[in-house]
Image (cartoon, helix red, strand yellow):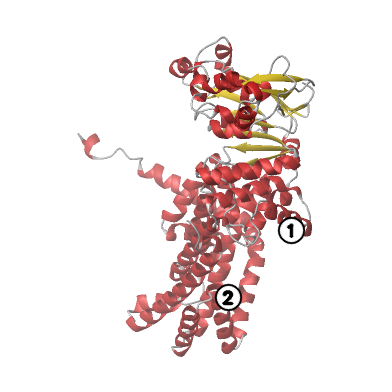
Amino acid sequence: MEFLTEFPALGRKTLSGLKRGVDEAFKGFSRTYGEALENFFDPLLQFLIWFEKLLLATPWPIILLVIGGLSWAGSRSWKITTGAVVAFIVIGIFDMWEDTMATLAIISVATFLCIAVGIPIGILMARSNRMQSLITPVLDVMQTIPSFVYLIPVVMLLGIGKVPGLLAVCIYAIPPIVRLTNLGIRLVDADVLEAADAFGASPRQKLMGVQVPLALPNIFAGINQTIMMALSMVVIASMIGVKGLGVPVLRAISNQYLALGLMNGLAIVALAIIFDRVSQSYGKRLQAHRHGGHR
Amino acid sequence: MSDAKVQIKNLYKIFGRHPARVLPLVKKGLSKPDLLDQHNHVLGLQDVSLDIPEKKIQVVMGLSGSGKSTLIRHINRLIEPTDGQILIDGQDVLGMNDADLREVRRRKTSMVFQKFGLLPHRKVKENVGYGLEIQGVADGEIATRAQHWIDRVGLTGYEDHYPGQLSGGMQQRVGLARALATDSEILLMDEAFSALDPLIRYDMQSILLELQEELHKTIIFITHDLDEALRLGDNIAILRDGAMVQKGTAQDIVLKPADDYIADFTKDINRGRVIRLDALAAGTAPSDAPVLEGKAVLEDALPAFVQAPAQVIGVKMPGGGVGQVTLAQVVEALRGDH
């Protein structure tokens, strides 16, 4: 009877031995390779520090001008541009400028990294069904595993700081861009691809001239999602030493400071909305061929 | 045979998981329905052979499912055959590696599609220049050559439109210009005009014939429409269930249908516009009879009969000499067998 009510689990001794074994193995791994990995990521760290310093050292009116300029370049809409500039002015007035710049720095670098790594992976996935069936479960794990769980090995390997924070953000934020790049390329009309084949396009010419351009709307939706997810990781990243708007939020949680939490939380929301609107309207503008006409 | 630009020899195409395994059965005469029932494979093409002469329009006709679109895709190997041979200018297309095949597709063949296959993110001029871009032609030259063909198909003024902004007929003009722009000798047209409504289709046929007058390309034209086949084709081949049923000129098809299936097909067409005088001419004409060209179709010859003494006219024969045709013969030919 006991056999049925109690699940026949491994004994406590076996289990703790197993866990210790894994921990020791990983510790050994991080002792051997930790430094090499840190060196590997050093250029990234230097760039991140440089970018953050640049944002902080630039006089705020210039930053506002640049924000306005980028918003206009992306969206061509006065509404969005004014909204972005006003949001940053309000952020400045409430004394969150420095934290916002730090967050902006890490989000920009994380997004850039995700695009640089994610789009090629997405293309790879689109080209082979085997790659797709290999990578899809990895993406599923990356999106569903609680962030704290993968924070543990990342911190064990690289310690606390900007780079592990950046990696944590990227692990969480990269799946959408990979998935949507893959999807976008797979959705390209077979008739159009056949035409490209018939004219003797090489695989590279097909990719760059037909597949990627026609997948752009989906790729842009992926970039948009990636930015949003990166922003939502700001608070968790601050737990492992990333400066920015997450730090005061974390302090607010542990001390029950309602106003502080709300202010910084809303600043994150403002950033998210600005990124979202600008990148979406840029994505739409890229597809001039979809406007008007017979379809 | 040496003037054949494209030769298709004993081509088989079987769709399914193990085409090579069932091929011997098909060669022994297993029928299409039996192949599907017993082995779950679909017979696409069955022992198709066709010599396509240079600088002529070869029409391949058949109803849907007859394998005609499959056949045309074998010529530039968009589809790999199960068995058989395809030669372009005597070169074996099936033995080529990817690079050689691409070279054939870039320089020797170009294709026009039923669903146009235009690149929706590119303007008309960029679509027309696509084949040249793939070849690696310089931008300036692409622009001039693309413009030339845009003008030729009557799309001047639409260079900066996107395909989505054009009507079906205009989109297919873009498709035609794109195919012509590469200066390839072989033009593959897969039901190119079938998606267009009848008036526009007629216009496009006229454009094609007009261009062919001066370009003399080797055109392989797929259609399910007999009127279109008869109007365009120097030669016509008819496919049914993946097998070649009849090959010949428009007249051959109409006057000597190979079987009831084809006879049924040709029943309702206007025979007066297909049958030519030289198909009926025989003997020698009386000296007072008016003389017409042998390639004149019956419909055009009728007024001459009315004026001719005794309703007999002379016809210039291909080998020289003048044959005679009587009105009674013409009436008989126009009536057909029924």
Residue B13 appears in view:
no
The relative height of residue B279 versus residue B223 in the rendered view (above or below) is: above
Residue drawn at (63%, 80%), measured in percent from left and top? Answer: A54
Question: Where residue B313 sits: x, y (%)?
Answer: 68, 23
| Position of A267 relative to B249 (above/below) | below
Residue A53 at x, y percent in the picture: 61, 80
Q: Quadrant of the N terminus of chain A?
A: top left
The label shown at residue A73 is: 2
Residue furthest left as drawn: A1
Which chain hosts label 1?
B
Q: Chain of mark 2?
A: A
Residue A127's tag is none
Residue A151 locus on image (x, y percent): 48, 61
Badge 2 marks a residue whose secondary structure is helix
Q: In the image, A189: left or right of B6?
A: left
Q: Which residue is mark 1?
A: B143
The residue shown at (55%, 73%) is A74
User: Is B278 drawn above or below residue A277 in the view shown?
Assistant: above
Report the residue at 46% width, 64% height from top.
A229
Point out the frontmost of discs 2 and 1.
1
The amino acid type, in three-letter code, at marker 1 is Ala
**Is disc 1 placed on a helix, strand or loop?**
helix
Q: Is residue B137 left or right of residue B301?
A: right
- Can residue A293 be seen by looking at this rendering? yes
Q: Is B125 placed above or below B219 here? A: below
Q: What's the amino acid at mark 2? A: Ala
Tell me which residue sits at (58%, 12%) in the image: B27
